[in-house]
Amino acid sequence: MSNQEEQMRRERAMQLQSQRHARRHATPRFGPAVDGVLWSRTRPGVEADESSPPPILSILEFSLQPGIDVRDDIQSPRKLWDTTLHYISAIPGCRAIEWGPELENPPVALICLIHWDSAVAWQRFQHSLGFSPIIGLLSSTVSNRCAKLTTSSVPRLGDIQDEAVVVDVVSVTFSAEDASLPERRAAFEESWNKLVASTVNEHGILRHSYTVWLENNASTFAKPTPAEAAAATELATLVAFVAWDGVHYGSHRVEDLCDNLRASLLDSCGIRPNISKKTVELIGQIQPGHHDPLRQPAALPTSLESVQEMDIPRQCSADLVNLRESARQALDRSISDARARTRLFPAPQGSFISQGELYDGNMPVIPRWRFSRGPPHGYHFVDTVWIQLKARTPRSQSPRIYNQLNSKLSILPGFVKAFWGCDEEDSARIAVLTVWEGLHERAASLHGYRLILDEFARSSVHLAAPLMSQAFPMTRNSVGLQLDAVEYIELTCFYVQPGALERQLFEDSYAAFVRMTVPSLVAGVPTACRGMDSGGWQPDDAAESFDFQLFTGVLTWANPAARLEWYEELFRLSCESYELFGHKLDALKMLSGEIVARFLKLQR
């Protein structure tokens, strides 16, 4: 054995030893499972050998960030929530979805119940996008549990239409030894059902009640040890759902039920289970409906603005297990074809987080927008003024207009350079981009800058409309201005609802969109577009209204043909896979009230 091989062997042995050590000290994690089988070790396909597999009830609990109220159906969080539920309801095997906020601390916590017709449908849900689009709304991990239903006729908690319904969710947790035998579990259920039946039901306050035993989650380790596997089954939990008439609801009734159950179990069995309750105001119920097939658009998209104006089907992909691998192979082929020059550029890059990765103790990390932390060399700031020319004004006047403005702007303190460009989609529109050394320098010269523009607007005979302006940051680097190397640039304005949370949610969704352009940056591959190290929030002093926050997204393009083809392919892929592509565009649409895109060719 050579010295190099011996060194590699030693390094591998040290790596394995380090992994074993880390595992011994790692906090055990238990992911969603049915019959002790982790969701990721199943391949949803045909039903099991059972002639009539039992239906499954998903029970999910979400803790929301402070200030989020999904009961407000005009706000962005509710729009994201409704869009997510619409997608989940389209998963084959979904029978119904019920949800509501907890009454003890509204609207900080939500409980959602999803009725599946079998374990295969539940597995499909865990492999799907699920609730991952709302990760940005959450303050902690998700409780992702399930239970087998003994009958398919379990009543929906909200079956009473047009009436307020309050649901008490009572959890009774036993040791595995106390609830190991089916006979004992049946006895515990009977004790609870007798107490519920004896409840005085004046005025029909009690609507209905049913109980389920939670399936134990399973170890997420690839090969769990016997001790790790046993740790997943240390407890057994009986969950009771009690639906009440919300108008006459009183918490004392379920509290009495819990007290009586404690006393009954202590007297009859000598055990003291842990009993807890949560009270939910049921405000949402979704039945899977018919999902219309996608209608072909009248015209293919030419920008992100036009993509967002089209309908993207919120439907579950057929082969969720192999979806990522198939997408990776397609992306690799597109990169090879781009290198061989048989296509202009690689395909957009898709990705998603599976529902099964959201469980108690585990929360996937969302990659943040890279400007959230600020670039190492700081920012320049760019002011852009849009000039709409009269129909009779020839475009040959544009350089003269630019020179007129540039001669005055260049003497302002903090001025770095000015650029001008022609709108490729409106021959009567041009833009002048003024680069400032930084935000403070821009603020010092802002008054003079606006005076120059006001004077130009009053004196020019070429203007057909008032000047429109926007401002955005641009990363400063040591090799010169980024705009010096740009020919085609797309500026997309997103009008976002005011608020710090709305700002963070939008940044996350825009970062996900920009990551779809990453394959164009692979070495040796022709570049179609680039999520330029520019763009961001307009400074407050440039805001025309406090009814929205203005975000400018900046993409640079190789040429107009690359732009058209890339957006066409993005739209096609989004229609083919909501998981990989469509949900990202949906989030941008939900989080921005209006989108305006303009495509410029910078002039030299």
Image (tube, grey):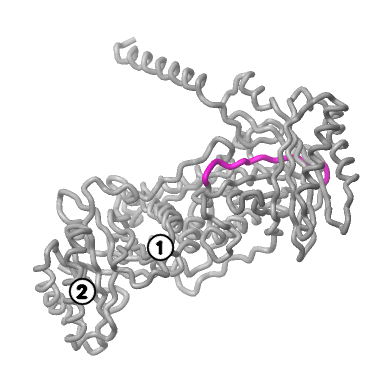
Please provide percent x and percent y for residue 48: 74, 38
Whether residue 537 appears in this view of the structure is yes
Determine which quarter of the picture holds residue 178.
top right
- Look at label 1 and name its amino acid: Tyr
Packing grade of label 1 (10 A; few <14, some 14-19, many >=20) is some
Instruction: Say which residue appears at 71% left-offset and 35% top-offset.
Output: 215
Residue at point 50%, 44% (across, down): 324
Query: Which quadrant would the N terminus be assigned to in this image?
Result: top left
Q: Quadrant of the C terminus?
A: bottom left
Looking at numbered disc 2 in the image, what kind of residue is underneath it? Arg
Q: Nearer the viewer, residue 474 or 61?
A: 61
Q: Residue furthest top?
A: 1
- Element type at mark 2: helix
Locate residue 291 relative to residue 299 in the image: left or right: right
- In depth, the one of 519 and 117 nearer the eye is 117
Q: Is residue 380 magenta?
A: no
In the picture shown, does residue 50 fall above or below 513? above
Per the rendering, the mark at residue 174 is none
Mark 2 or mark 1: name the one nearer the start of the chain. 2
**Which quadrant would residue 404 be assigned to in this image?**
bottom left
Residue extent of the magenta highlight: 139-151
Q: Position of residue 291 (x, y in %)?
A: 65, 63
Q: Is residue 411 above or below residue 582?
A: below
Residue at left 30%, top 63%? 539
Pointer 2: what residue? 450
Residue 377 located left or right of residue 359: left
Q: In the rendered image of this protein, does residue 521 appear above or below residue 411?
A: above
Q: Say which residue label 1 marks.
A: 567
Q: Residue at x 55, y 49 (%)?
A: 64
Which x, y percent locates residue 463?
Answer: 23, 85
